[in-house]
Image (cartoon, rainbow, N blue to C red):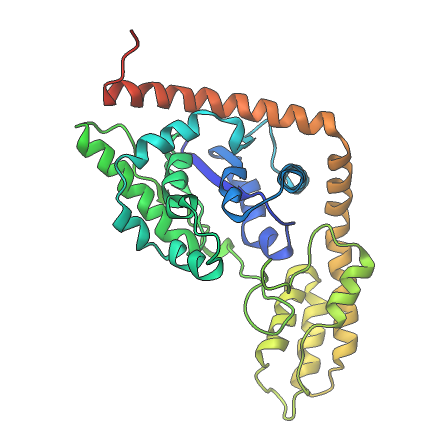
Amino acid sequence: METVLSGIRSTGNLHLGNYFGAVRNFVKMQENNHCFFFIADYHSLTTYPAPEDLHNSVRTVLSEYLACGIDPEKSAIFVQSDVREIPELYLLLNMNAYVGELERTTSFKDKIRTQPDNVNAGLLTYPVLMAADILIHKANKVPVGKDQEQNLEMARKFAKRFNFMYKTEYFPEPMPYNFGEELVKVPGLDGTGKMGKTAGNGIYLIDDAATIRKKVMRAVTDSGPTVENQTPTEPIQNLFTLLKLVSSTDTSDFFENQYKNCSIRYGDLKKQLAEDIILFTAPIREKILEINADKEYLRKTARVGAEKARESASKTLEDVRRIIGFKTF
């Protein structure tokens, strides 16, 4: 059984893109792997969160992932800041990370462009903290998106560098966890690109029925097909993709056939899509609200998850300190 680790952003709600893109695969992963899922609240400090925002965001994200099927009995789901061994490993790895290589990372370049007034040291050493998150549990596999592939490669580099410097084979080199065809790219409602938090083009799992209807009815379309069997434009293909995710095969086939014979009415398509999204998300939304209201359950889940994570992390840190040469007098 392999050890798999995945970080969860501690800001923002989950949308359909998150669910179909990764979360439902996390649920499957925990059946056959030793999984650690952590809410990355240390990472979020690079963007000025207020104290109340930090706690509320962590609570929201924890509720949503539990509602989607992460099982605290099968996996360790924990808050990053509850595992005090992570910052110490982060410090030790920083001693063997070089400014030049960190400045060249794409994530750092992107951040200094998007937040030029807050270029803090945490942004520069973000890949080192990510490496500490991974290596503290000696993870073999890490699910990552395209934007994090370089940072995972940095984690592999730091693992190899540690092993070389201290003449050991202690850290495994973490590999990307590939979901293959199961990884679905969910389009946004603005006609281009994928669904995302920053783009503001998403349907969130916590959205109520009225909000979903309003968002879907505003989805970008075009003037309609002009000839039979015309290839759909990107905005329309995006709507068809969403239909296939949440609607029955008969429903999606019906509207695609209407498009092919030029009889489609986009208003009808959007109304059907909205109702099917509501039907799909309603059970998840109910679970999110129920779990979020149960403070004791959330506290217990976070505490048990932290205990599991610290059991793994403390053993790693003890070994690392011994390998480096630290001794207690």
Q: Is residue 40 visible?
A: no
Q: Is residue 44 visible?
A: yes
Residue 108 in which image quadrant: bottom left
Q: Residue 204: percent from the left, percent from the top?
A: 69, 55
Residue 193 in which image quadrant: bottom right
Quarter of the image that includes the C terminus: top left
Q: Would residue 281 appear left or right of 37 to someone viewing this image? A: right
* Relative height, residue 305 to residue 16 (above, below): above
Q: Residue 140: percent from the left, percent from the top?
A: 36, 37
Instruction: Name the foreground residue: 33 vs 103.
Output: 103
Instruction: Name the foreground residue: 188 vs 179.
Output: 188
Q: Residue at x 60, y 86 (%)?
A: 229
Name the residue furthest right. 210
Q: Residue 105: percent from the left, percent from the top?
A: 34, 54
Residue 266 in which image quadrant: bottom right
Q: Would residue 130 appear left or right of 232 to someone viewing this image? A: left
Quarter of the image that includes the N terminus: top left
Name the residue furthest bottom. 227
Name the residue furthest front. 117
Q: Residue 116: percent from the left, percent from the top?
A: 46, 58
Q: Residue at x 48, y 40 (%)?
A: 6
* Relative height, residue 73 to residue 191 (above, below): above
Q: Residue at x 24, y 23 (%)?
A: 324
- The total number of labels drawn is 0
* Relative height, residue 73 to residue 259 (above, below): above
